[in-house]
Amino acid sequence: MKSLVSPKLKPGMADEALQVERTKTGTLRAPGTPGPLASFARFVLFGGGVGVASSAAVAGLAGLMPWAAANAVITVASTALGTELHARFTFGTGRAGWRGHWQSAGSATAAFAVTSAAMLVLHLVQPSAGALYEQVAYLSAAGLAGIGRFLVLRLFVFATSQTRTTARAMEPTPTREAGPQVSRLLPVPAL
């Protein structure tokens, strides 16, 4: 029978028992998990690569079917591919699973809404906006949406238990007043 009590550790061995490593900044992270800057660089590389490839794929597939249908097919495929790449390489968590795919699709939908809203606002403010203004508005919105999507994926969707623990440790904890504890139990009638 396996003991439920952890064995006594020698001083300084707690990190090895938790299978974490200490970074140069003093934060803890699971081995093989990239840090925030490496994750962001990989996020940009894989996300941008999938974006460029999907742009070419939509153009090719639009010759076989209506453009809107080709865009929908490629959007679904590129979101699934990007999610797997981010899970495995960007955040180092292994396979994404259905939950990860649905949450990633939700963040991609939110990013789509942000870029669409930016273009809508641009055309409301400047109805005859040229291609340069459209590109500046779209790329600015896409950049902000991408940063937001990276944070959502890193902190929630593909967060390891260590990342979640670190995020919770950074939140302020509520304080309790010292004093007697009073139980507020209601009387239960005997049957």
Image (tube, rainbow, N blue to C red):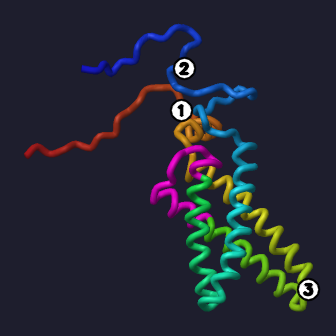
Query: Which portion, as a residue range, is magenta?
Result: 87-107
Residue 6 lies, in percent from the top left, at: 40, 18
Alpha-carbon distance for marks 3 and 2? 59 Å
Q: Which mark is residue 187?
A: none
Q: Is residue 9 visible?
A: yes
Circle 2: element type? helix
Q: Residues within 10 Å of mark 2 (few under 14, many from 20)?
A: few
Q: Secondary structure at mark 1?
A: loop
Name the residue: 22% across, 42% down. Answer: 187
Tag 3's secondary structure? Answer: loop
- Badge 1: how crowded within 10 Å, few (<14), some, or many (20+)? few
In percent of the image, x 63 and y 55: which residue is there? 152
Q: Name the residue rendered at 59%, 66% in the picture.
A: 79
Front residue of 170 and 130? 130
Q: Which residue is mark 1?
A: 176
Mark 2 belongs to which amino acid? Answer: Glu
Residue annotated with mark 2: 16
The Cα atoms of the two marked residues, 1 and 3, are separated by 59 Å
Residue 39 on image: x %, y %: 69, 46
Up-down: is 59 above or below 37?
below
- Report the amino acid beneath label 1: Arg
The residue under label 3 is 130
Corner quadrant of residue 84: bottom right
